[in-house]
Structures are given as C-alpha cells and as structure tokens.
Amino acid sequence: MRHAMRAAATALAAVTALPPVFAPSAAVAQASIDAVPSFWSVEWGQTDFAKNNIESWAEIMSGGPPKDGIPAIDDPQFIFVADESTIGDREPVITVEIEGAEPRASPIRIPIAVTFCPLCNSGITFDRRVAGDVLSFGVSGKLRNSDMVMYDRETESWWQQAVGEGIVGQYTGVELETLPTWMESWQEFKERNPEGIVMARPTGFQRRYGENPYVNYDSSQRPFLYNGEMPPHGSNPLVRVVRVGDRAWPLTRLADAGEIVEQGVRITWRAGQASALDARQISEARDVGTVRVFDAQTGENLAHDVMFAFAYHAFWPEGEWMLGS
C-alpha cells in the first residue's frame, strides 16, 4: 500500500476559488528594502520583517484577498473513490502516494495537503516539519513574481510557494522538504487506485469548486501581475515547463517525444488531463496531458513541478533549459 501524507494536515484552498480584485498598493510599489510598509505591521503583528532575503518590498504586492481571505482547509475529510461523483474524469487532481497507507487524491479545485498557485500553475506538496516543529500554513494574500506567498501561523513567517523557502520572518532562508507528488486526471487516479481515497468537497465555504475564474489564462500572452524578466529562448511566458531541481524541460518537447531520458531522470507524458486554467468548467478544458518524473535508474518518483516558463525563469534565472538538439 502507498500512503498519501495528510500533507501535514494543512490544506491550502485553491486560489482559483476566488477571482481576485488586484489593486497593488502605491506605498508598496515605492517602498525600499529599508522601509517596510507600516500598515503591514497591523495585520502581521508577529512577523519579523527585519529578517528577510528579498531585495525590495516592491517585489511583494497584494493579490486582492486579505490574509486568510482564501482560507486553508486545516482538517480535510476524505471519502472512498467509489463514493465520489462530482469530479470530472479529465479534471486534474494532485496525487500523493507514500509507502504505508492509502493513496490519496486532492482535486486542484480544492487542493489539500498540497499547495497550488494558478497564476504560476505550480502545484507542490511540502513536509510541514521544520526544526522539530510542525507548522500550519495559510494564504497571506500576497504575491511575489505572480506566485502565492504563504505564511505559517506559528511565527507568521512568509514563504514562497514555488520554491518552498521562507522569505520574511523567523524562518527566512529555511527550505521546506518537497515531496514527490504529481498532477494527473481523476480518471487516471481511479484506474490505478480503485480502493484509494479522495478529499471530500468542503462545506461552509462560498466557493464554486470545479470552475476556473481565469478563463483562457494559459493561452494569454502575458502573465498576470508580473513585472519581471520574460523567459529566454523565445519561450512563451505561459508555456508549461517540467521543473526538476534547477532544470526545466518544455512541455511541448515532452509531448512531442512522449518520453525523455536524460540527466538521470525519465520524464513521461500522456494525454488525458484537462487544464485548470483554460475553460470556465475545468472538466471541459483543453488537454494538457499528465507528466510523471522518475529516477532513471531506480524508477522512484521524483519531486518536480509543472509550472509556467515565466515563473521558472523568475525563481531560477540561472537554471538550465533542456531544449534538446
């Protein structure tokens, strides 16, 4: 049996659940590293702003909702695969399979035990244990390079979702361990794990689960709320890349090949998974396929992310682009 960690029992609700009204503060836009916006200290009384690893406070802007305006689901409930009838077969889920217990699926529409930022298409599962403590995470309402900034409730340190690193506060510079999970269609998960479990639809939240407020976002020409450098090699900023460590393989190359084996990894692609950022109804969106990443020698699942090219370049500006010959 393979076990899906309760992903440290914290569920970050999908940013897709609420179309934000973006209004970056002029105070933040003009701030320098030496001038923390004073109004932040009211909302973030425990955050140690003196400790950080960012170059300018102007890098961080409001994503619209305030702190916890996109609520985390701290105690997700799970049901058996056979009892779930609301998820479309092509709809993407994040699969967590770890030696020891039932495989679990978390719909992108309500990602639990994992984090998902639709503006970067970044879905990553983290181990919440840090220095002997178990942290609980929420959504800060802030963005940096168009990527979600999380926070932990214990110290109110801020964490960059795409890299899993503390950027402001007590845990600045600390990196969370990334677990080897992946996105796949609900149909794929069901076929492989008929006795598995899936997160039940949460109650008590005014969310249109299964709907995408960013219609046609992944076919647009520019990222939302991003002022950084565009990716090199003529890459469309919103093309997907498969990031493994500091290397990135364009999804277009992988889809053409079906399988790529190089640099010690084996990456596969198969059709059947809908985009979470195309049609209004996620289950009816265009096909972007499912990516799996394995150690080329042992066959073990490897931690990775399928993210937009602009986000990869923003956080790995010196990263290696695996473009092929």
Image (cartoon, rainbow, N blue to C red):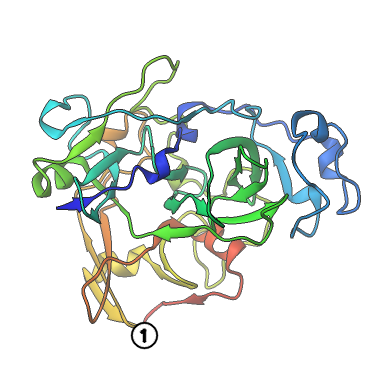
* Snapshot quadrant of residue 53: bottom right
Give residue 312's position: percent from left, percent from top.
Answer: 53, 62
Work out whether residue 250 can be spotted: yes
Q: Residue 269's x, y, as percent?
A: 23, 62
> Residue at the spot x=60%, y=42% of the render?
152
218 shown above or below 316 = above
Residue at 19% x, 45% y: name it.
Answer: 102
Say if residue 240 shows up in the picture.
no
Q: Give the left or right position of residue 216, taking residue 66 as reference.
A: left
Helix, strand or loop at mark 1: loop
Q: Position of residue 140 (x, y in %)?
A: 63, 36
Could you say which is closer to the camera, residue 246 or residue 146?
246
Q: Residue at x 13, y 42 (%)?
A: 190
**Residue 275 sits in which quadrant?**
top left
Along the viewing direction, whichever of 211 and 179 lies nearer the viewer: 179
Residue drawn 45% across the image and 44% down it: 115
Is residue 40 found left or right of 243 in the rendered image? Answer: right
Q: Quadrant of the C terminus?
A: bottom left
Locate residue 273 relative to residue 83 in the image: left or right: right
Query: Which residue in the protein does label 1 denote?
Result: 325
Please, what is the three-letter code of the amino acid marked with disc 1? Ser
- Front residue of 219 and 68: 68
Graded by Cα atoms within 10 Å as few (under 14), some (14 to 19) or many (20 or more), the crowding at tag 1 reads few
